[in-house]
């Protein structure tokens, strides 16, 4: 038995990717480096872990070995100060699912202040729907590339009421952005367990997909902490980097436009897929959005940068006709977030940050959902989110979402 365990641990450890040959490059946003910075933000060959337009805030780029020297020279030529930091050893979560049979998983395995695995998340949602069946409903709305069910949780009084307005939240479409699903669960838990929100929920239904990319998320927990895409296998080699699609580039709205400078190939982490809406996860989400015709808001949770981004993302200087309404609401959400612990998010057009086509908030806005945003959660120097961040980030984002819900509630009453 001991031998078996040793072999198991040994083989597991060896299949977990480390990035000791990579480097973090960190530089501050200044007034002087604005142009240089905007050009860097647009460079899709660079993996930006954090873009921070605010002056004095840190930007973090994750450099591959073959990018280190040329990027360093690029900074030195422009006399822009930067720091290089070693990528520390990644500790992968202990696979709790191997310790217990899935059928015996329960609410007690799920911790609000932990990064839970997919089975724990599902058990938690099932328990909530069972315990609060008068206002919480769980639905399988599709499947992932590898056949895992995708769950949608609806919270609202009454469950089968007349056509109410809705707010839709998606999280963890990008596998490595764990803080987004923990935040989605924070929001769910607050709405379900705090009865002061009952009034709101009689007028507005809240729909949450806390885990849109379960295959990618589990891959990032078990094998590659920096994995971003889904796990659709185009190649027979599952270890290859050329697996998967960036789901947040796959939506069929200005998908992969020809006029952008860089078209990511199949091995690039921003690969938009073979065609618009090609992926199971994307298709399933599109179907749900089509069905829910009374949505007033769509919030896509991402990480990092402390940003509230509004459409459009596919091209610069293209804004929706009601952009002033979008900006006004974004500032209300920003103030809500600020009220929690004084963290100041920046409101920005997403294309002003970087061009990204085929993204969820553009698709949602194009399908008529008035308030569509991407929230980039957290901004700290150390890239990997720790479980200590879950509660403060959960609290502040909920404070922002609450303002949105209250405003929609008032709009309905007026
Ligand atoms: Zn993201």
Image (cartoon, rainbow, N blue to C red):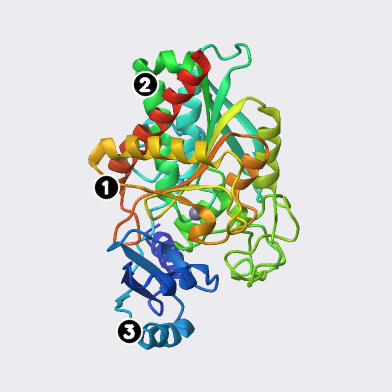
Q: Residues within 10 Å of mark 3 (few under 14, many from 20)?
A: few
Find numbered disc 2 in the image and state the secondary structure of the residue it sits on: helix
- Labels 2 and 1: the sequence-earlier one: 2
* Of labels 3 and 1, the one closer to you: 3
Q: Which residue is mark 1?
A: 388
- Labels 3 and 1: the sequence-earlier one: 3
Rendered residue at 75%/57% (across/down): 275
Is residue 260 shown left or right of residue 344? right
Rendered residue at 36%/40% (across/down): 334
Determine the CA span between mark 2 and mark 3.
53 Å
Question: Which is more toward the observer, 37 or 47?
Answer: 37
Please state the horizontal and vertical placement of residue 217, each as a whole percent of the image: 51, 52
Question: Which is more toward the observer, 310 or 167?
Answer: 310
Determine the CA span between mark 2 and mark 1.
22 Å
Find numbered disc 3 in the image and state the secondary structure of the residue it sits on: loop
Find numbered disc 1 in the image and state the secondary structure of the residue it sits on: helix
């Amino acid at each position: 038995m001991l031998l078996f365990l040793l072999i198991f641990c040994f083989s597991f450890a060896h299949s977990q990717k480390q990035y000791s040959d990579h480097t973090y490059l960190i530089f501050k946003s200044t007034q002087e480096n604005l142009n240089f910075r905007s050009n860097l933000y647009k460079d899709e060959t660079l993996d930006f872990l954090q873009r921070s337009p605010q002056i004095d805030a840190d930007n973090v780029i994750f450099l591959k070995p073959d990018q280190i020297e040329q990027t360093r020279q690029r900074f030195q030529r422009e006399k822009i100060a930067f720091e290089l930091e070693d990528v520390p050893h990644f500790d992968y979560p202990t696979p709790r699912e191997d310790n217990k049979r899935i059928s015996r998983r329960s609410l007690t395995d799920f911790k609000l202040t932990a990064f839970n695995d997919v089975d724990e998340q599902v058990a938690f949602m099932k328990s909530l729907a069972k315990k609060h069946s008068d206002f919480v409903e769980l639905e399988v709305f599709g499947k992932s590339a590898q056949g895992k069910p995708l769950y949608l949780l609806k919270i609202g009084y009454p469950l089968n009421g007349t056509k109410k307005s809705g707010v839709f939240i998606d999280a963890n479409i990008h596998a490595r952005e764990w803080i987004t699903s923990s935040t989605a669960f924070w929001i769910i838990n607050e709405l379900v367990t705090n009865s002061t929100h009952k009034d709101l929920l009689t007028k507005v239904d809240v729909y949450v997909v806390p885990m849109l990319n379960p295959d990618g998320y589990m891959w990032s927990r078990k094998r590659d902490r920096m994995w971003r895409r889904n796990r659709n296998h185009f190649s027979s080699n599952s270890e290859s980097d050329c697996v998967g699609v960036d789901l947040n580039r796959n939506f069929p709205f200005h998908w992969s436009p020809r006029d952008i400078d860089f078209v990511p190939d199949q091995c690039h982490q921003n690969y938009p897929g073979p065609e618009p809406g090609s992926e199971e996860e994307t298709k399933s989400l599109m179907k749900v959005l089509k069905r829910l015709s009374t949505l007033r808001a769509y919030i896509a949770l991402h990480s990092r940068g402390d940003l509230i981004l509004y459409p459009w993302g596919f091209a610069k200087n293209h804004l929706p006709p009601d952009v002033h309404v979008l900006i006004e609401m974004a500032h209300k959400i920003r103030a809500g977030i600020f009220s929690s612990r004084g963290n100041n998010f920046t409101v920005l057009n997403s294309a002003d940050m970087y061009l990204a086509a085929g993204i969820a908030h553009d698709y949602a806005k194009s399908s008529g959902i008035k308030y569509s945003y991407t929230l980039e959660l957290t901004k700290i120097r150390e890239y990997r989110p720790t479980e200590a961040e879950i509660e403060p980030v959960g609290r502040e984002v909920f404070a922002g979402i609450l303002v949105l819900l209250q405003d929609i509630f008032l709009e309905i009453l007026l």
